[in-house]
Image (cartoon, helix red, strand yellow):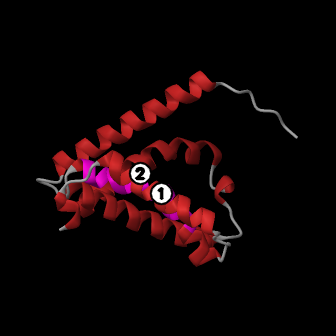
Amino acid sequence: MTTRSVKPLQGALLLALSALLFSLMGVGIRELSGSVNNESVVFFRNLVGVVFFLPLLLTRGFQPLRTQRLRSHLWRTSYGLAAMYCFFYAIAHLPLADAMLFTYSAPVFTPLIAWWLLKEPLTKRMLMTTLLGLVGVILVAKPSAALFD
């Protein structure tokens, strides 16, 4: 078994940087959505990802990308692209705080999706904590009435 070094300060700083970058992305998408359609925003967001991925591809070739589960990867890619499209659409058409509510509530839905798709057991305790988590996210985010319209 390998051991990992624990660096809580580095982890906390990277987590804060991640939150900052996601916030900046949300603000940028919000600003762009007034003059650029959603499909273009999603395309260029993915193009940026390709630019960061390209050096790995050029140095190591396609060998690290070989897989026995191509169909599963294509499904995951499709779901991820659809989720990104919907998220960017929400950022463009809802108040930014309301759109972020969905992002923060994603872990709350994970047990329900695992029960539905993966047939994992869902105990009463898990269901209650899931509902409590959803109520907590809504209370913290304080969504506007636009979310319910």
Q: Residue flagged by tag 1: what amino acid is it?
A: Leu
Residue at image point 50% right, 56% down: 107
Query: Which mark is on residue 132?
Result: 1
Magenta span dominant secondary structure? helix
For label 2, the residue is: 136
Q: Residues within 10 Å of mark 2 (few under 14, many from 20)?
A: few
Q: Is residue 120 left or right of residue 56?
A: right
Q: Where the C terminus falls, by quadrant?
A: bottom left
Residue 11 pos. (x, y %): 58, 29
**In the picture, which quadrant includes the N terminus?**
top right
Residue 112: image quadrant is bottom right
Circles 1 and 2, Cβ within 8 Å, touching? The answer is yes
Percent position of residue 37, x then y: 18, 61
Q: Is residue 112 magenta?
A: no
Viewer-side residue, 72 vs 100: 100
Tell me the tag on residue 143: none
* Amino acid identity at mark 2: Gly
* Frontmost residue, 33 versus 44: 33
Q: Residue at x 53, y 41 (%)?
A: 55
Identify the element where label 2 is drawn.
helix
Describe residue 37's horizontal placement relative to residue 99 as left or right. Answer: left
Looking at the rendering, the stretch of residues picked out in magenta corresponds to 97-111
**Residue sitting at x 34%, y 54%:** 138
Residue 38 in picture, x, y percent from top left? 23, 61
Q: Image height check: is 21 above or below 144? A: above
Question: 126 left or right of 143?
Answer: right
